Image: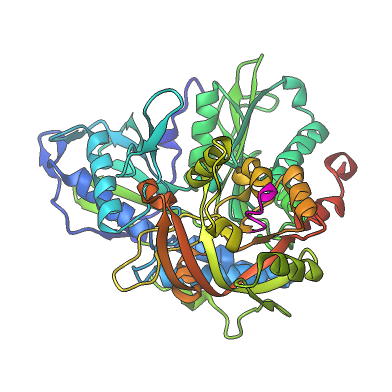
Amino acid sequence: MSHFSFSDLVDFGERGDYDRLDLASPRVQGDSIVLPSGLLASLAERAYSEIAFRMPSSEIELFASILDDAAASEADRFVAATLIRNAAVAAEGLYPICQDTGTAVAYGWRGEKIRVEGESDEAAIAEGARRAYEAKRLRKSQLGARDFLGESNTKDNLPALVDLRVAGGSEYRICFAAKGGGSANRTSFTMESPSLLREADLEAEVEKRIRALGASGCPPYRLGLILGGSGPDQTLYALALATLGLLDRVGLAGSAGSGGAAGEANGAPIRDLSWERRMLRIAERTGVGAQFGGSRLAADARALRLPRHAASLPLAMGVSCAAHRRARAVVAADGVFLERLEADPARFLPRGLPTLGGARRIDLDKDQAELASELGSLGAGAFVLLSGTVVVARDAAHARFRDLIAAGKELPGYLLRHPVFYAGPTEAAPGRASGSFGPTTAGRMDAFLEPLMERGASLVTIAKGARSASAAASIARRGGAYLGCIGGAAAIAARDHVASSEIIDYPDLGMEAVRKVVLRDLPAILLIDSRGRDFYRGLAEDRPRPDAAR
């Protein structure tokens, strides 16, 4: 194969999986298909509005498969059921699936016979994204640079990531997606030595990377592994498409058309099911499970092998998180079609829902030292239900707390009185206490923790994912506690577990403003206790390392 094009490989399913939209129709003009001005913007607005609240049925089916898996832990089942319930709440259209409504992403392939009137395609899609994020009160998370280090919120969630390429044919195919920071941050990419191409060595490297994923990106994950690539950009592009489920039609290893004659290669990409199964087994061995411990860190996997230069071996791994938001669209002479998303996720729930057995109710309004002591008596891994007042603050607010410390000023009293919940909720719908509310990654706040705890602040913190050894040491030294909540379940958390929410500091930070939030029976797990015992670290120590696995 002298050349391959991803436009020939992407999987857009069957037309029966799509709904026809009531938008301005393309018109045939000679050999061309002309898209009226404004059509792409309207399509993008509709797509981004849809994916904020609904997911493909295939994603809900993956959650449901965990409920039927005899090897899954009760914690796995509880998280899976919560994610399905979350999807059902979000599908009603008031609470987005996740509080991180993400970067607006579009990958498209424009047929050579397609002609678009009006502004550029990229600008039209970005405008549609802007309108959707404004109309649906979606969180605006994009930061623009003021100078090389300074930045501020762009206030419209732009720029979007729009990647459009020319393809053959008479269709315009676009995959619209929303990519949250937690899952994007799980991406790893390196240029390896070709000496890695030995089964045992490659498996050890893959295991190291899967173990490093942890729970911060909101599992259960769709894993993606790309080995090879004619350049780094091709490898990362393939990873993005694979984790969106767009490269499932790539030829399977050993199948007709996947390579040349016996002992030869023709440069075609290959999908390898055996490595996908291996990735799932490795994920199972981590013990992290679907966030609260178990076997279902990953629900699906894709492993693709690409051609490469003889001196280079690109290797990339990434995930799509539990908030898998994607909708494919096709524009053709006969109309505009958008992938049908799941409208009734609750149909996948069993009659008897899993529960967190033995969960203890915790009053967050206690004196913070008393609260930390009570949590410490439970031990890492204990399940709890949280009620009471928390302060909600994340990256930008913590940077300002750091500046106060550097200037020798006192910290705000609320940091001394209340647990700190690392989060950035969406804007609340009228009459609702909160927008979608869920934890952000705790590890990003680790650098701030010791200076705050040294001054009596942040004794108890709440977020998601693992923390560094230095953060665990600070928690042990100060007699604190760190709790984790389910990532990717922000709609149900807001509706059922947030009693009130108000901005109390730094309103200029937008979604990163400091809030006072009152919780009621929010499920959580004690991840690091007052002795520094770390739930996730304990799981890693109890399981074989990559070299032992070989």
- Percent x, y for residue 415? 57, 56
- Percent x, y for residue 102? 43, 48
Please give the name of the residue rendered at 79% of the width and 51% of the height, measured from the top-left corner. Answer: 477
Residue numbers of the magenta segment: 453-460
Please give the name of the residue rendered at 79% of the width and 53% of the height, measured from the top-left corner. Answer: 476
Among the 4 quarters of the image, the one containing residue 362: bottom right
Q: Is residue 130 left or right of residue 74?
A: left
Please give the name of the residue rendered at 61% of the width and 16% of the height, measured from the top-left corner. Answer: 309
- Decide which of 413, 546 is in the foreground and name it: 413
Q: Is residue 135 left or right of residue 393?
A: left
Magenta residues: mostly which secondary structure?
Answer: loop
Q: Is residue 178 above or below residue 237?
A: below
- Decide which of 228, 379 is in the foreground and name it: 379
Please give the name of the residue rendered at 64% of the width and 40% of the height, measured from the top-left corner. Answer: 447
- Whether 458 is among the magenta residues is yes
Q: Is there any visible trace of residue 186 in the rendered image?
A: yes
Among the 4 quarters of the image, the one containing residue 421: bottom right
Kindly give the residue lying farthest to the bottom in the view shown. 351
Q: Is there any visible trace of residue 71 in the rendered image?
A: no
Kindly give the residue lying farthest to the left in the view shown. 29
- Decide which of 1, 503 is in the foreground and name it: 503
Kindly give the residue lying farthest to the right in the view shown. 548
- Percent x, y for residue 342? 41, 66
Quadrant position of the C terminus in the picture: top right
- Percent x, y for residue 190? 64, 27
Q: Is residue 203 left or right of residue 161?
A: right
Q: Is residue 206 above or below residue 349?
A: above
Task: Give the total number of marks visible in the rendering.
Answer: 0
- Decide which of 213, 415 is in the foreground and name it: 415
Give the image's coloring scheme: rainbow
- Whether 35 is among the magenta residues is no
